[in-house]
Amino acid sequence: MSDEHSPEYYKKKFIPLIYLVGGILIVGTIITFAADKMGIAERWGFVNAIIFAMSVAVVKASAVIYIFMHLKWDIKLKTISLTLGCTVIFFIGMMWLTVGSEIDSNKPGHSDNTWNHVTEPEPETAPETK
Amino acid sequence: MEIPYYDKERPDTGLYNGKAGIWLFLASEVMLFGALFSAYVLLRVGAEPGTWSMGLMNQWVGAFNTLILIASSATIVMAWVCLKLNDWKGFRKWKWATVIFAFTFLVVKWSYEWPAKFTHYDVTFVTEESASKVYTDVLGPEFSETQSKIWQERFDPLKKDQEKSPLAQVKLKDKPLDGHIVGYIDSDGVEHEVGAAWGIPFWSHAFAWRHDRKNIEKEKDKSIRYGEDGRPVYKEGHFRDTFRDKDIKAIIFVPAHGTWDREEKHAGSGAIKYAEAKHDAGHAHSEGHGHTITIAREDISRLSSYEPAHSTFFATYYTLTGLHALHVLGGILVMLYHLLPVSRRVYEKNPVQFTNRIEITGLFWHFVDLVWIFLFPILYLL
């Protein structure tokens, strides 16, 4: 944390926050695990199950970054916010390169030629000779 | 010469230099793991049906390790808070707790989870007849039907209505029978037990890799010496100890957890333990009775343990979890350094400098936790 706090702050404010984040992480893990065991992919569909599990993971990750990694206090610092911002943009772009290309190849009217190189070529018929 | 250390925050960044450095490092780490996550998504989406065997993951172990890492993330913050409160004893207590949690994570991964995979083998068959011979004639029609369903759960674990899965159309010969190899029968009909080291059978590539590196002849420049057949030359008395190079007519095999029916009709005591299976192999076993079966070599089209070469899934699984585990190991080494007497001297000389070091280590450790937060649902659940 960039700001200095009094010992009282750490004892009365920060340590309870640590327990709170720990609780969020444990509950989040249990929720994801239980949802998988209950077969949410079958009930809600595969895509919704992924969105649900990733949403829980994002909540958990946000709690870690915000409190454990002190972003709550440090986000106002340009060095950190710029570094994080660039990283997030890069990460989203990188994921879109792969996921987006796959989605594009599955659009109606757009033939997927991803695996054409592994299929056997059609045998060419010899030209008829007179 | 003493390296100067500036514990004051710079006016332009608002951070002390070490903290600015660790954030830039973590950004590069996001790009490293981001590239791997991205590759995983592409491979997963593009995988042919019946080739993504994520149903083999032990979810309970994955969940346990997740909770362990979460606990370590909380304890390392507590260690840092203790330093802020000038509580050295409290710092050591929480730091040791973090090291123990981290070490537990690695022990579970490297001494249980991975070796358990190296001892499991998949067998696929040459023809429908040879597959049918094992599945139906030897194990019985009831087993065949149950196994078939369990096999689909492996590749399509999220699909509960297995009848509607496209995997239902996959031929029997391509459905892997999974289990343990406990021995083999040579061309003279003599039975041999399969040895193992640290729970890894000699046939596993993981073992062969260690075995190979020690016993291959080297050239003067320390490169591997190759024979006229293009294969590495082994020191006298040594040879590549793999399935392909042994005199094997048939393997003695134990259908194992997941493959065997879960209602325990056949297994008796449920999951068959490796030691128990080895015990069986030492006794006369008739096909279809008891735990062991023999599968002729000529009927096997592929035999592979759950190692990286098994499939694209396991290759990505070991790459992602292996790289993550190396980060955990690196974190443990740094944290142990902070528990050495030299760290006490640094703390007494400059408490702010040492507290900053702990904060930086903590930031790295939280990143390791963050990576696992995403790895767990992706690799184990979805």
Image (tube, coloured by chain):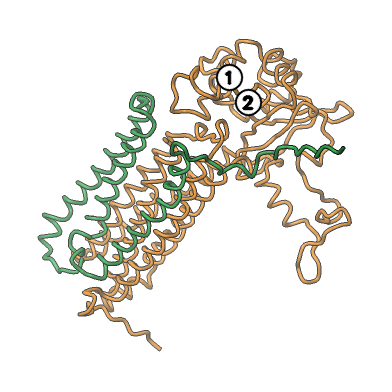
The secondary element bearing badge 1 is classed as: helix
Q: Are marks 2 and 1 in contact (CB under 8 Å)?
A: yes
Q: Residue at x 37, y 63 (%)?
A: B26
Q: Mark 1: which amino acid? A: Ser
Location of residue B223 by image quarter: bottom right
Q: Say which residue label 2 marks.
A: B175
- Quick one: label 1, few (<14), some, or many (20+) residues within 10 Å? many
Q: CA distance from mark 2 to mark 1?
A: 8 Å
- Viewer-proximal residue among A10 and B300: B300
The x and y percentages for residue B260 are 58, 20
Name chain B's colour: orange
Which residue lies at the image location 21% right of the left edge and 69% below the top edge?
A77
Tell me the amino acid under the disc marked 2. Answer: Lys
Report the chain holding disc 2.
B
Q: Quadrant of the N terminus of chain B?
A: bottom left
Among the chains, which one is green?
A: A
Q: Residue furthest bottom?
A: B1
Label 1 belongs to which residue? B148
The quarter of the displayed image where residue A35 is located:
top left
Residue B315 position in % (x across, y down): 57, 46
